[in-house]
Image: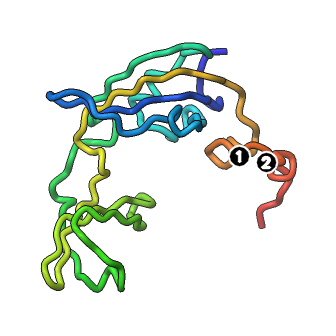
Amino acid sequence: MSITAHQVVTLHYVLSDVQSDGKQVLDDSQARHRPLEYLHGHHNIVPGLERALEGQAVGAELSVTLMPADAYGVRNESLVQPVSRASFGNADIQPGSCFQTEGEAGPQIVTVVSVDGDQVIVDTNHPLAGRTLQYQVSILDVREATRAELAKGHPLPPGTDHAKVEDRKVL
C-alpha cells in the first residue's frame, strides 16, 4: 500500500540539522524506541517531508533534505520582541529557556533571548526556523485511518476503542 491522504503512517526517522560544518542529530525515533505515527494529508508533519513521503510504501528508506520554507519556516526577526517580566509570573527565566504559549494559530514555543530587569526579549520563531534539515526515514507501516482518526485529524493511541469514540454524539 502506497502512502496517500487519510492513511496512518508509522515510521522511524533521524532528524539532523545540516550545517556547513557537518550534521548535528536533533532527534532519533529509533533511539527513543518509539516510531512516529501520523495521519497523512492532515498537516501532522512538516510540509516538505509529507510531500516526500507521498506515494512511498512500507519498507522504503529515504533521505530527505528540506530547506527552511519546507520545514519549520524562514526566520522572521519581527517575531523577536520585548515583553514584560510580569508575563512570566514566578517562573525562573533564563536566556535559552523555552515555554509553550497560546498563539494566534494555536500553541507556539517561545524562547527567552535575554532578561534585563523588567524586560524580557523573546523569540516566537519555531526553534528550528531558518534551518536546513535532513530526515533519514524508514517506513514501517501504512494503514487506512479510522473514521474517528479522520474526525480527530490525527492517529488515536493504541488500544483506543474506536467504536466508542465514533459513536459519541457531539452536543
Q: Amino acid at mark 1?
A: Pro
Q: Amino acid at mark 2?
A: Thr
- Residue for badge 1: 157
2 on left or right of 80: right
126 on left or right of 8: left
Secondary structure beneath dot 1 equals loop
- Residue for badge 2: 160
Label drawn at residue 33: none
C-beta proximity under 8 Å, tags 2 and 1: yes
The residue lying at 72 percent from left, 28 percent from top is: 144
- In x, y percent, where is residue 36? 56, 36
Where, quadrant-wise, is the N terminus in this rendering? Answer: top right
Where, quadrant-wise, is the C terminus in this rendering? Answer: bottom right
The residue lying at 45 percent from left, 16 percent from top is: 62
167 on left or right of 53: right
Rendered image quadrant of residue 134: top left
The image shows residue 42, relative to residue 168, as above or below, that is above
